[in-house]
Amino acid sequence: GESVGLHLPTLSVQEGDNSIINCAYSNSASDYFIWYKQESGKGPQFIIDIRSNMDKRQGQRVTVLLNKTVKHLSLQIAATQPGDSAVYFCAETPSGGGADGLTFGKGTHLIIQP
Amino acid sequence: DSGVTQTPKHLITATGQRVTLRCSPRSGDLSVYWYQQSLDQGLQFLIQYYNGEERAKGNILERFSAQQFPDLHSELNLSSLELGDSALYFCASSVDPGAGNSPLHFGNGTRLTVT
């Protein structure tokens, strides 16, 4: 099957700075995208989602950008805090759900430096 | 707290054995998904049930099986265990029949160690 991948396995940012986590996907049929945060010892936690009829969606301190032309997704976290340290996954699926459920990328480990 | 409950949290067993992992979905959710997370494979979709019926199948081995009961809780059965089955097993739930309509909400997983 097609895969979703992340550009950088580890991202280190200073506390208070903004961070950007990138994700590339290859399934052109995908039109529903989700970002998850996974802390050590816990399951993936839903952060924000976006559908392909949108380019941008904002939540609390987070923004997801979708570029369908180049099949690229990004998660922006504003004013990072120590609690933002985690592994972040992007996931994608066609609307209605593909045969493979959600397809996850490998994850980016975000490290917040004090 | 996602509202999805998984038991047990940890499981240690020997090769060749059989184990059962249990999942209670969020209240009102009809879909249950099972995922396997290992260091080298990331999160891999295993199987999905919707309202008691198998809905979608992913990379699930024949040694593994699952079911969803009338009260909507689900069990994942892993048999003839091998060392390579050691991983985190996550259950997720959603209200919709497909993964593309609303986000999945994950439990905190069962860590399986096969020795």
Image (cartoon, coloured by chain):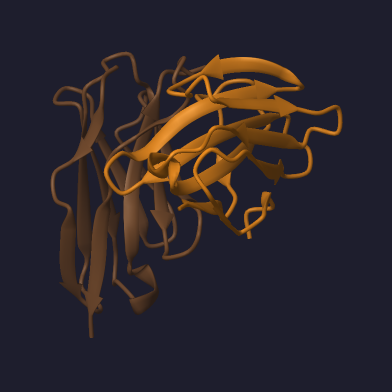
Chain colours: A brown, B orange
Furthest-right residue in this view:
B70
Q: Quadrant of residue B96?
A: top right
The vertical placement of B51 against B91, above or below, is above
Residue B79 at x, y percent in the picture? 58, 32
Furthest-bottom residue in this view:
A114
The vertical placement of B52 against A108, above or below, is above
The residue at the point 34 percent across, 64 percent down is A86
**Image quadrant where one finds the N terminus of chain A:** top left
Residue B49 at x, y percent in the picture? 66, 23
- In the drawing, does residue B31 fall left or right of residue A95? right
Q: Nearer the viewer, residue B39 or A40?
A: B39
The residue at the point 61 percent across, 15 percent down is B55
Q: Quadrant of residue A23?
A: top left
The residue at the point 29 percent across, 33 percent down is A55
The residue at the point 25 percent across, 59 percent down is A109
Residue B36 at x, y percent in the picture? 46, 39
- In the drawing, does residue A49 fall left or right of residue A54? right
Residue A114 at x, y percent in the picture? 23, 86
The vertical placement of B39 against A39, above or below, is above
Q: Nearer the viewer, residue A32 or A52?
A: A32
Marker count (numbered): 0
The vertical placement of A92 against A16, above or below, is above
Q: Nearer the viewer, residue A32 or A107?
A: A107
